[in-house]
Structures are given as C-alpha cells and as structure tokens.
Amino acid sequence: MGVFVFLPLVLPLTAWPIARLADRHLHPRTATRLLTALAGVMAVCSTVCLGLLMVVGTAQLPGNPLPDGWSDPEVRAAVPYDGIAGRVAVPALLAVVAACAVTLRRHRRLTRRAHRALAGLPRTEVAVLADAEPYAYALPGGAMSEDRVVVSTAMLTCLEPAERRALFAHERAHLAARHHRHLLAVRLAAQANPFLHPLRKAVSYAAERWADEEAAETVGSRRAVARAIGKAALVSRGTPAPTLAGLAAPGPVPRRVAALLAPAPAARTWPSAFTAVGMAAWTAAAGTAVSAMSSANSALTLAVLLHAATPL
Amino acid sequence: MTNQRQHPARRGQGELEGLVLSALRAADGPQTAGSVQERLGGGLAYTTVITILTRLLAKGVVSRERAGRSFVWTPVSDHAGLAAHKMRKLLDGESDREAVLASFVTSLEPGDERLLRELLGRAQAEGED
C-alpha cells in the first residue's frame, strides 16, 4: 500500500497538458471523449483511495468497526498509518460524497423543472418561447419527457434563415451525442478531485466545438455557424465581468468563431507520439493507468490485511 | 392511485395555470373568476381559481380590472409567454446549469466583443468575394 494509496490523488496533474492542448490539436469529438474518460477513471481511482485512507483513518476512532487484530503493530506498520492523512480522509470523503449527491439531485430537479416550464406548449421538438431576452438551449429528455430545443423569439429574430438552421443543428448535435452526460460526468469528477477542474473546463469547450462542427456539416457552411454564434453572443451579452482588460485571454465565443472560420479539423483518432499533443496524451494515459493500478494495488493490500487481521 | 382519483384537482401548479389560461383565452372578452370556474367544468374550487389567476397576474400573463365588487380577468399573453416566464425564472435562479441546459453561447469576456466583430467583419468580406 504505502505511497501508492496517495498517488491517485495527485496523478490528475498528468492530464493538465492534454487538457490545455486538446482544444487546438485534437478533433473536438476525440477531445470530448478522451478527456471525459480520463477524468472519469481518475476520479473513481482518487475516490477509491480516499475511501481506503478513510478505512485506515477510522482505526483511530474509538468504537470503530474494524477487527481487533487491526491495532496489531505489525498490521499498522504495513498500512500508511498516518495520523494526519487518515484523519483528513474522513471529512474529505464525506465532502466528496455530499457534493456529488447534491449535484445529482440538483441535476434531476432542474431537468424536471425545465420540462415542466414547457408543459403548456405544443409537444414539438423545438419549443419557441415568447421572450424579449435572446437565448437558446438544448434540454435533454428526462424520465417522462423528450429532448427539446428551447429558443426565445428574440434569439430567432436576430438570426437569418441559414443561421437559424445552424443554431438548431448545433442544439440537436448536443442532444444526439448526449453531451449533457459528458458534462455531468466531468462535473462530478471535478468535485471528486479538484485537480480535475481543468479537464471539466476543457470538456465543456470541446463539447461546444463538437456541436459547432456537426452543425457546420449539417448546414453545409462553416461561415453560417460562425455568424450565428457571433450574432447570438453580441445580442445576448450581459454586463462584462470586472476583469483587467488587456490581460484577459480571448473567451470561448471568439475562439469558437475563429475555429469555424479556419478549415475543418482533421478527424484523426489518436495523435502521433512525436508531437507535443501526442506526448501530452500519452502522459495522461500513463497517469490514468498508474492511477488505476495504484488504487487496485492498495485496495487489494487492504483487503488482504483486513482478512488476515480478522480472527476467523 | 385511489387518492388521485378522488381528487382530480390535485394536479401540478403548472398544469392548473395552463388550464386556467386556456379557459380564459377560449372566452371572448374579460371574464370573472366565477365564469372561468364554470368554463373549467367545475373541477376546481373557486378559491383555487382565484389563486391561480393571481399567480398568472404576478407572471404578467393576465391582467385584471375592477368591475363592480369583483375583478374581470383578461389574458395578455399565451402559453409561450407563460413558458417563457417560467424558463426565465429557472435560468435566473440557477447559475450552474450547464449539464442540463447547454446554452448556445456563453457570455463574452472583456475584449471579446472587439475581437468578435473583427472576425465577423472578416467573414463577411471573404463571403462577398
């Protein structure tokens, strides 16, 4: 067990380079799937190790359910009996479980409420809301409801016919590829281990890019999609965030428009290992593999120890 | 199950608002709460109808005028307006909703607007060639 049980907690750092490079060097579809998978596996491993540390940590609590043999000095020497890590792991794991439970509940409640808001409208795929505020959303179906595209009249009036088609194609691409599942998965992953936060941001951008590319293919014009995004963003801009102007990097909207005005990305599945992005991808893959092996190793060690320490 | 059958009026608030709005819109001219209740077939209590109408008034979907000792109610918006109101309330109340409602565009950061106008201008110029 030893140091292995701590590795999955910090190994998400190996995915940072690919999270940074994916948006410009990978096809958005590849980027979304790869980063979601990496984040998911690493989050599970990290949580398993937190759980193992917690089991070790509870040995210090009076009245713990662990077998008596557990307090044997020999057994203690074999596990990372660390006064701090064990004690920190208990609240950390509780916080992770609570945060994920709250997120899942909120997700379900929000889906239900959104569908209920549309209840009085005709049951068409596109729900047009009479609203002076411009917005457009893809709303995935719930237990009893279908996928919907929600768009306000103000958004529709500011777009030309080709741009409207681009908007609908974009939202339908989100729904067809079940992007909300990717987004929820990386959200939970980032809650399980804060080091996975950059992956969450990268996935939400990659999913938008993926839908943009699908829309460009459907309407047959990259420029129409770019114009639709640009116009929609310009009419729906709220109050700008108080950041230091000049220092801020371009936000996601101009980057999406710029990407659409450039040629379509190549649909390669896996980058060559001799490029920066290839190195980054392999580093992340290796980090994930080590993470999985470490947590499996630690879990097995602890199981064997517990078994040996149980007087049966 | 049996409980629901005994109380057909025990339905979601949203559904009731839709029903009352439909009844009001089907009538020509302003209606009193009593006539709305009649139009609904008597399935709802008078006080429920008043409550629902007041709620629709708060949402800006109906308006009312005093006529004698009671109010008469007029629809000012349709179901799309009611849905828009509910959706706006949902959107304003929940900030972190990306996984449920994926927005077409995110808000612009400072400097983005200038950059975006440049990009769109370039796209326009190239498109006209």
Image: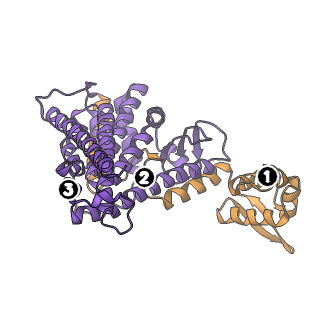
Q: Is A229 located above or below residue A5 in the figure?
A: above
Q: Position of residue A141 (x, y in %)?
A: 55, 40
> Mark 2 highlights which residue?
A236
> Mark 1 highlights which residue?
B4
Q: Position of residue A110 (x, y in %)?
A: 53, 52
Dividing the picture into quadrants, the one containing residue A281 is top left
The shade of chain B is orange
> Mark 3 highlights which residue?
A74
- Circles 3 and 1 on the same subunit: no
Which of pointers 2 and 3 lies earlier in the amino acid sequence? 3
| Distance between the alpha carbons at the discs numbered 3 and 1 | 64 Å
> Which chain is indicated by disc 1?
B
> Which chain is indicated by disc 2?
A
Horizontally, is B92 left or right of A63 in the view? Answer: right
Q: Position of residue A227 (x, y in %)?
A: 37, 38
In the image, what residue occupies the spot 77% across and 69% down? B65
Q: Mark 2 or 1, which is nearer the eye?
A: 1
